[in-house]
Image: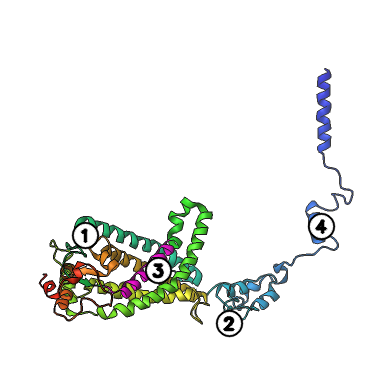
Amino acid sequence: MKHLLFAVLLAGGAAWAQAPAPSPAASSADVPPAAAATTAAAQPAAGAVRSQNIFDVKPDASADPGYAGQTNGERARVQPGNNAPMWRQVGQGVTGYSSLPVTQAPEAGNLIQRFVQYPGSRFTNAGEAWREVRNRWIIPYGAALLGITLLALAIFYFAKGPMGHAPADGPGRRIERFTPFERAAHWSNAIAFCTLALSGIVMAFGKFFLLPVLGPTLFGWLAYALKNVHNFMGPLFAVSLTVIILTFVKDNIATMADWIWLKKGGGMLGGGDEEVPSHRFNAGEKGMFWWGITVPGVFVVLSGLVLDKLIPGWGLLRGEMHIAHMVHASLALWMMALLLGHIYMGTIGMRGAYKAMKTGYVSETWAHEHHALWAQDIRDGKIPAQRSSEERSGPAAAQPAAAARSTP
């Protein structure tokens, strides 16, 4: 009985505590609750700042025929706080005010670039259009091009094997294929290009295969270091490319023999091992010179100089940088794919080719096998067998030229 009485008293006390207290300010019969809330909202506390409600000024402003063409100042008079005209102009690439000199920062007043449509992109602002071209076209298709090239070279090597039979240092008269100056120009250009290619591959594709392995910190330092190597190696490549073009252009002019070489595929596609006669460089090497090195190389160098801001008056606008980057990346990938074939033929793809560029000399048998017309011109005395002043040593140097001419 005592416990029951205690429970009843506890329940009654809880109900009394939860009951609402009567308002001393006004009687519920005089002012309804909804009206009281409206009155309180309409009377802010003394000293408070009341925000502007655009609908309190002119709620039907959007019905004005010239509403869409209003400036930001005109819109502020009818709908304060509505800055849509200003942001619409920003999105359209309108240049605003900037205290920076135009000569130093010509686009300082442009937050968003104008709408353009690059090849392969949507019609959108220039920055987004460049990003679409890079991420949807250059990166995936560039990687596919390099991968397909490596796969094709591997298949060709295992199916065909190294070309040629005669070693570059075989018996017989020594013929100078490359002078010391030509070899120095070649190796300088080759080292510069390989450095640029490797650093460019890391910067373009490294986040896909190096970032998961190295982690963001190490990969960030590596990419930053290779970016600086890339920038400083570029001028060396430009100078060596100029020397390469001027040195080898005279021997890379097309002749009728090149059309015959192309018609027969250089003798590489058939079942036989005999190569099509050619002069010092065959049609394939001449095509590499023009379309794998000279023409794309010139545009890669020029676009790289724009990206480095080394050409006065160029590279100050973002649109110029977009175009320069797209040209630079696309042609660089093209060069890498073609020069992979050049590196293959100069190393494991042809017997004696690497030693010819390393030492500068080949045997007359090697010259006849790979460049029969060039070897014939040497035998006929039209081209000297020794073009530089460098003297060869060894017993082969003492062989008389008449005996060497008898070598097939």
Find residue 406 and report its horizontal and vertical position in percent.
10, 72
User: Does the stretch in magenta take in 197?
Assistant: yes
| Circle 4: element type | helix
Is residue 118 shown to the viewer in this render?
no
Specify the amino acid type for callout 2: Thr
Q: Identify the residue at the far top of this view.
A: 1
Residue at 69% x, 70% y: name it: 81
Main secondary-structure element of the magenta-colored stretch: helix
Distance between mark 1 and mark 4 Cα atoms: 94 Å
Question: Left of 369 or right of it: where is 152?
Answer: right
How many residues crowd mark 2 within 10 Å: few (<14), some (14–19), many (20+)? Answer: few
Residue under label 3, please give it: 192
Q: Mark 2 points at which residue?
A: 103
Q: Residues within 10 Å of mark 1 (few under 14, many from 20)?
A: some
Q: Is residue 204 above or below residue 262?
A: above
Please name the residue that numbered disc 1 is placed on.
162
Is residue 248 or residue 151 the one in the foreground?
248
